[in-house]
């Protein structure tokens, strides 16, 4: 995918509503993906935790801007039963791995090279973030990123870790 097409896709994703709560509170689709660590990681491993899935790509400017903020949220709340999983959606993970060398994160990075998990979560643009409660229900879908959106993430995380 060329950078120009990717930028158009990302821009289209940013035009969508920023915060949209899942009205059904439906169960989060289960998946297993290869991780940057080399192991396979499944969502089920995090049962009982608040989980944030962040779908991203290395070519996505807003994703690059958001990633250090996500790292900060993860570091602040992971001891309280919260985990963040970065799901890279690129068919070739080399660009993602190179970018992560420059902007390291301590949360797990998984690779959705065939976009199967992205489709399960109705990801339409980059970045997209899904927050799942301790019972495994989708509680929030956030599409796109603009400065300040992380405050909505924090509000949701704080509320859900107390539930």
Image (cartoon, rainbow, N blue to C red):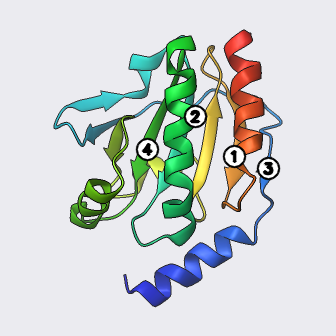
> How far from the left and from the top, in percent, is residue 57?
43, 63
Could you tell me how far apart the alpha carbons at marks 3 and 1 are, in whole angstroms? Answer: 11 Å
Asked whether residue 126 is in view, the answer is no
| Residue shown at the point (58%, 30%) measured from the top left | 28
> How far from the left and from the top, in percent, is residue 43?
43, 27
Pick the quarter of the image with the C terminus.
top right
Could you tell me how far apart the alpha carbons at marks 2 and 1 are, in whole angstroms? Answer: 9 Å
| Element at label 2 | helix
| Residue shown at the point (47%, 57%) measured from the top left | 56
Kindly give the residue lying farthest to the left in the view shown.
38
Q: Marks 1 and 2: in contact by CB < 8 Å?
A: yes
Q: Is residue 11 left or right of residue 113?
A: right
| Residue shown at the point (58%, 73%) measured from the top left | 10
User: First in sequence: mark 1 or mark 4?
Assistant: 4
User: First in sequence: mark 3 or mark 1?
Assistant: 3
Label 4 belongs to which residue? 86
Local crowd size for mark 1, using a 10 Å CA cut-off: few (<14), some (14–19), many (≥20): some
């Amino acid at each position: 995918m060329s950078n120009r097409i990717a930028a158009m896709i990302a821009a289209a994703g940013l035009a969508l509503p920023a915060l949209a709560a899942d009205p059904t509170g439906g169960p989060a689709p289960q998946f297993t993906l290869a991780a940057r660590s080399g192991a396979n990681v499944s969502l089920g491993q995090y049962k009982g935790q608040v989980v944030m899935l962040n779908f991203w790509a290395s070519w996505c400017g807003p994703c690059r801007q958001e990633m250090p903020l996500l790292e900060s949220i993860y570091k602040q709340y992971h001891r309280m039963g919260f985990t963040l999983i970065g799901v890279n959606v690129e068919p070739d993970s080399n660009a993602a791995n190179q970018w992560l060398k420059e902007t390291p994160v301590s949360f797990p990075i998984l690779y959705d090279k065939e976009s199967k998990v992205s489709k399960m979560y109705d990801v339409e643009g980059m970045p997209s973030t899904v927050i799942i409660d301790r019972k495994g229900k989708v509680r929030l879908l956030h599409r796109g990123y603009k400065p300040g959106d992380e405050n909505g993430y924090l509000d949701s995380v704080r509320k859900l870790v107390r539930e």
